[in-house]
Image (cartoon, helix red, strand yellow):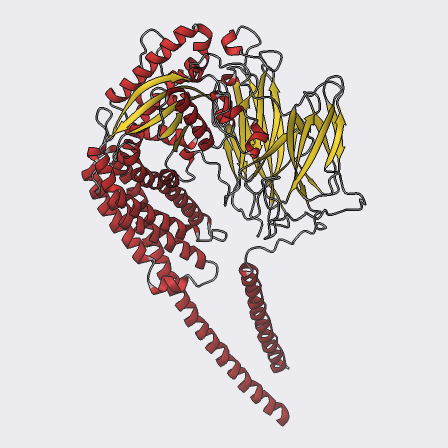
Amino acid sequence: MRLSRILMALTVGLAIVAAPTAAGASQPQPPPGYVPQPPALTLNRTTIVIGESVVLTGTGFGPNETVDIDVSVAPLAASVPGQAPARRSDGSTVAMAAVAYAQPQPAPHHFTAQTNAAGRFTVTYRPTDVGHLTFTATGRESGRTASATLTVLPKKQPPHHLPVTGDSMSTPLKVGGGLVGAGAVLMLGSLVWRRRNRFGMGSTR
Amino acid sequence: MAESGVSRRGRRRLRRRTRTRIRRTLLAGLVVGSLLLAGAGWVGFRGWQARSHLLNAAGLARELSAQIVGGDTARAQRTLAALQEQAGAARDATGDPGWRLGQRSPYAGDDLGAVRQIAVAIDDLARRAFPTLLRADLATLVPKEGRLDVGRLRAVSPELTDVNAAVRETRTRLDAVPTANLVGQVRTALTELRAEIDRLAGLTGAADQGARVLPSLLGADGRRTYLLVSQNPAELRATGGMFGAYAVIRADGGRVEIVTQGSAVDLSQFDPPVATLPDETRRLYTDLPAIYPADVNLTPHFPTAAKLYREMVRLRTGTTVDGVLAVDPVALSYLLAATGPVTVPGGPRLAADTVVRTLLSDTYQTMGLKEQDAYYAAAAAAVFNAFLAAKVDQKAVLSAFDRSITERRILFWSARSEEQRILGASRVSGILPEQESTPTVGVFFNDGSGAKLGYYLSPTATLTVGDCQDDGRRELHLRLTLHSSAPTSGLTKSVLGAGKAGNPYIIRTLVYLFSPAGGAVLRARLDGAAAALGGGFERRRQVAVANVEVPPGATRTVDVDVLTGRNTAGTPELWLTPTATPWTTQIVPASSCNQ
């Protein structure tokens, strides 16, 4: 009775407060503008390996306007992009060294894009930084801003597949031991048998 | 001839010697063999004894739990005594030197060890956990007329803490028993016992947590006020649904009552926003959560939503509450299954199997705005009375709450940090953890059509464990489908709402895909083609946002690849927005990476 009673106590408490739920489902529409919009700046992939490129697509900007795109980089360890720059003890920030992969020019951290008549733009970007890259697009006339975050992973080690070794060698060892034992017994047996046979043959002669 | 005679004699002697040797070897072999046989026989005999004791114990444990739930204390005491005897005997049978020696033998050794651990676990529970659960007489704790005896609850709290600790200890020990090489029967027994103890640990954990935090929450140390909000899954939000009506409830010395009721619409909108959101949050949700009460829970992290809503209510009404409790109509349907149907004056009666439809679909279709409000108020009062008056089936109510909490349909946030700490990362707290040992993939829905079409949406998810990476991460593949059973015509304006997707019958859902903590979302495909993904970060998880628009009768499929964080193991889990039509989910595990 006890445990259930405690839970019962818990649950009835909740039940009491749960009752007005019925009232909850009712609501007239809230003021318009509350409906969340689909993302205005999108990527074709959210994580890439350095050396690959990503396609940025912006929608809902002004027609034929210039859109400024800023890129901020945060290290992979810090998951909050653009929030935790590395600092020295004197407070100055440490520049993140870009890792270049057969790309002499580091990728720009600021560039622009031009929208079409429908307020849409597409650009391809090939990062030279490993980390979390946050793209912030701002329309020069419309003032519309949108952002998206990309994770750039370092280049993978050449793939090598570890053999599946099993979590313990005991079973193969046991089987092997058993086989060796059985083999030894058989060999001894055959030795004895052959000896007896030979002597037996000798005695008949 | 002489030579041959000598050699013949020598051969004969040799033969005799060989025979003696063979005889000795055979004798020694026989002795060793019979000793081994005797040993095996003894262990086998003890094993047979242990088996029958364990079988008896298992039967008794089942009986006991039935009697505990059924409230038959006297018989439960007798059952417990018998259970202790059987469990003790099983422990003895598996504790003698022969058995210990047997545990070191090849092949059967780990089976014997596992049986021993099973016997020990059952004995420990029978001696340390069950008696306390039976002894603490909580009969007075059953609430009468909406009042709980918080003093008594507080008194039994330390005992529950002990029981919980004992159960956890047992679970840890059992988890350490390797299952890989066990024979089928022992493995099955062990797996079943583990599952049983997991359930028990869930119960004792909840009871311990509840007993520690409930007295103060229910006003044992002074009056408390809370916001009770109902989430409306007809218009989906990450934690379940748009916050609709709210009630201010007061708890004082264990008595709970409704003070006032209000609607999210009364709160209108806030300019300037009620809070400056962190950049991370704004990138994903813009400023909407701090402007509109309908958007506070665009984030799946319930404490953020609760804090914003509390502030909004404070600004409009001047009431500062001590916490926020959120529930949804599906949870109500589970409860109605326990109480039976409730008659509502001036409208359709509420029954378990129809309440979701009644509240989330029919009412919008058949009633005007004023009628809806009157009906909902009457329904609330009727359900409230039914809970206090009806003789409810405890077992059913328990399972209803258990299910509601498991499905994250009941969420609670306390404004006091010490109480939040006790609630921890339990499901009821709705905290999206920043660290995790088992990878969790989050799939959250925010309605983007501005309509009440969520009732027609049915989601499924299949999570498949994929390849191991060199750095200890692992790839996971998620297949998500969204099906709409909406009609193509005939719905009223109050259902169709803003119709942001163009055709007002198309359900536009913004799907927020959360990577495991410290992990990454790699890519996503919508019906096989690369999806345009917005996104950012929240609480150490990469988030990708896809816009999925489902026409009536159609199904759309999203395939997502994610990476786990570095130091996680075990079968991954899904964290989902609870929907009006419950999810169909499947998780396809794989063997661990270090095997």
Residue pictured at 45% horizontal, 36% vertical: B431
Q: Is residue A50 left or right of residue B359?
A: right
Number of numbered discs on residues: 0
Residue B199 lies left or right of residue B270; in this view the side is: left
**Viewer-proximal residue, B459 or B34?**
B459
For residue B67, above or below residue A142: below
Q: Position of residue A35 (x, y in %)?
A: 55, 19
In which quarter of the view is residue B565 placed? top right
In the depicted view, which residue is nearer to us: B474 or B285?
Answer: B285
Asked if one can make out residue B530 in the rendered structure from this viewpoint, the answer is no
- Left or right for A47, reference B495: right
Task: Reply above or below: B304 against B234.
Answer: below
Write down the quadrant of residue B316 in the picture.
top left
| Residue sitting at the far front | A90
The image quadrant of residue B515 is top right
Instruction: Give how far across and how far down residue B304 sits, in percent.
Output: 47, 31
User: Can you say which quadrant of the picture contains the N terminus of chain B?
Assistant: bottom right
Relative to A127, say whether A201 is above or below. Answer: below
For image coordinates 38% across by 17% down, the residue present is B262
**Residue B282 on image: x %, y %:** 56, 30
Camera-nearest residue between B2 and A137: A137
